[in-house]
Image (spheres, rainbow, N blue to C red):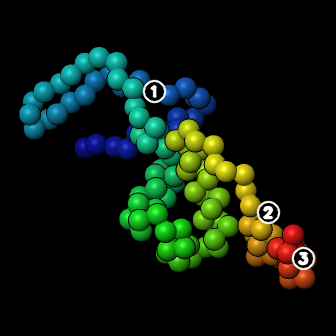
Amino acid sequence: MSKPLPIPFPGVKEAPVVIELRFPNADVTVRGEFELNEFALLSSENLEFLRLYIKVRGNLKEVERILGVSYPTVRARFDAMLRGIGYEPDLPDPKDEALTLLEKGAISPEEALRRLKK
């Protein structure tokens, strides 16, 4: 029975190299050195996020609704997924940070409003 790739592998930073591909129904095995693409190297959490993102056709508000988390949390997960495939996300919007802090109760509504007006 097939198992998911153990990625990331504990304590190892380098990308794995696949040395064998097997097509059991065709009874074919191919040996060599094959690189995994960036999507195959995503953590299971980032891969599930990507699947959901694709399913809702890139609508982060819909991801927010389905996951039941705040928009800034969805953006943070999106940014983590982007980093997972090798892209550096845009700098965070200070307004998102203010909303996240408000949601956590770290700042007052008045302080959040002040930051949002900047």
52 on left or right of 3: right
Q: Position of residue 103 (x, y in %)?
A: 76, 76
Residue 71, picture quadrant? bottom right
The amino acid pointed to by label 1 is: Pro
> Looking at the image, can residue 6 be seen?
no
Residue 34 in percent (x, y) is at 35, 23
Please tell me which of labels 1 and 3 falls first in the chain. 1
Amino acid type at mark 2: Pro
Q: What label does residue 94 carry, if any?
A: 2
Whole-percent x, y for residue 117 in the image: 85, 75
Which residue was labeled with disc 3? 114
Give the mark toward the camera: 1 or 3.
3
Give the amino acid at mark 3: Arg
User: Tag 3's secondary structure?
Assistant: helix
- Gap between marks 1 and 3, in whole Å? 48 Å
Earlier along the polypeptide chain: callout 2 or callout 3? Answer: 2
Relative to 27, residue 45 above or below: below
Q: Give the quadrant of residue 104.
A: bottom right
How would you rate the neighbour count of disc 3 (Cα within 10 Å): few for under 14, some for 14-19, many for 20 or more? Answer: few
Point 9% across, 30% down: residue: 27
Circle number at residue 16: 1
- Seen from this angle, which residue lies furthest left? 26
Cα separation, mark 2 vs mark 3, equals 12 Å
Image point 51% across, 46% down: which residue? 43
Specify the quadrant that holds the C terminus: bottom right
> Residue most toward the front?
118
